[in-house]
Amino acid sequence: MKTALLRALPPTAALIILLGLWEGLTHLLSIPAWLVPPPSAIATAASRDAAPLLSAALTTGRSALLGFGLSAGVGVLAAVLLSSSRLLERAFYPYTLFLQTVPIIAIAPLLVLWFGPGTRAVTASSFIVSLFPVIANTLSGMRSVDPALRDMFQLYGARRLATLWKLELPAALPHLFTGLRVASGLAVIGAIGGEFVAGFSEDAAGLGILVLSAYRQLRTDLLFAAVLAASVVGLALFGAVSQAGSRLLRRWHPSASGS
């Protein structure tokens, strides 16, 4: 407990200093609140609009979680298929780069046409944005298996499925969780981006809609509060993935044990 408090002290102190400087400069320089609101105004807006902020965060979080779950499952399966053949990898892996480079805002209208407005289109946006890191990192981990261990499995006549399950996937776990941590943040970004175009429906409005609404009303304090809520959603998903990876890997891999 004491060690955890000591670790939390520097970032907490830095945050307090940053917020104090921000608050002081906005008053000292007479910066208009509609341009850069002070932290106190943002806190007031977050408190006043706590209910819609929480509802929007839950809506966005649900879409991001669904998109992230799909990217995790599909990404691992795609990596397994690509790792089974160098020919398959050379043929199809370059096209997975499209998932990383496509501007999601540009194709969001297509997602609305295909899936309809609301949760399904937003989830698809989150899935597309967060898929590539899972494929790339899992495939990299499976390709980095120690050749001596692979030769030993072949020597003992291990079948392809046994080699995959007992050697390649366990060896790829550290890389996989690295990809999942990256994907967790991208899933929230994809969900917010999808909501800018596809978030209007009978469903509850997400944080992307709240950001647009606050912008149009020049409620910059609420806009900052919505952005902060989106960051909290992303941090929560990232923290959950990191915690799961730490618990799974800490007994045998130095990346989690700290050794």
Image (spheres, rainbow, N blue to C red):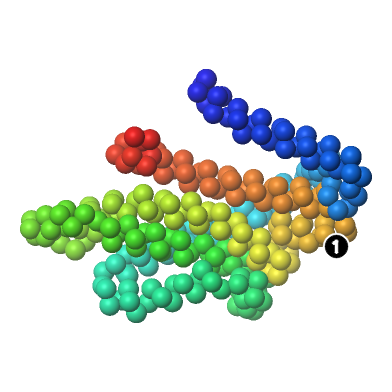
Q: Could you say where residue 152 lies in the image, as x and y percent from the top left?
A: 11, 55
Drawn side of residue 23 relative to residue 162, left or right: right
Drawn side of residue 229 relative to residue 48, left or right: left
Up the image or down, 243 lies above or below 70; here it is above
Q: Nearer the viewer, residue 124 or 145?
A: 145
Report the number of discs. 1
Up the image or down, 76 lies above or below 249; here it is below
Query: Is residue 40 visible to the viewer in this orientation of the structure?
Result: no
For label 1, the residue is: 216
Drawn side of residue 88 relative to residue 131, left or right: left
Query: Is residue 222 visible to the viewer in this orientation of the structure?
Result: yes
Q: Amino acid at mark 1?
A: Arg
Q: Residues within 10 Å of mark 1 (few under 14, many from 20)?
A: few
Name which quarter of the figure residue 158 lies in. Answer: bottom left
Q: Residue at x 55, y 48 (%)?
A: 237
Q: Nearer the viewer, residue 114 or 11?
A: 11
Q: Nearer the viewer, residue 142 or 16?
A: 16
Drawn side of residue 52 relative to residue 147, left or right: right
Q: Could you say where residue 71 lies in the image, as x and y percent from the top left?
A: 47, 62
Q: Residue at x 40, y 63 (%)?
A: 136
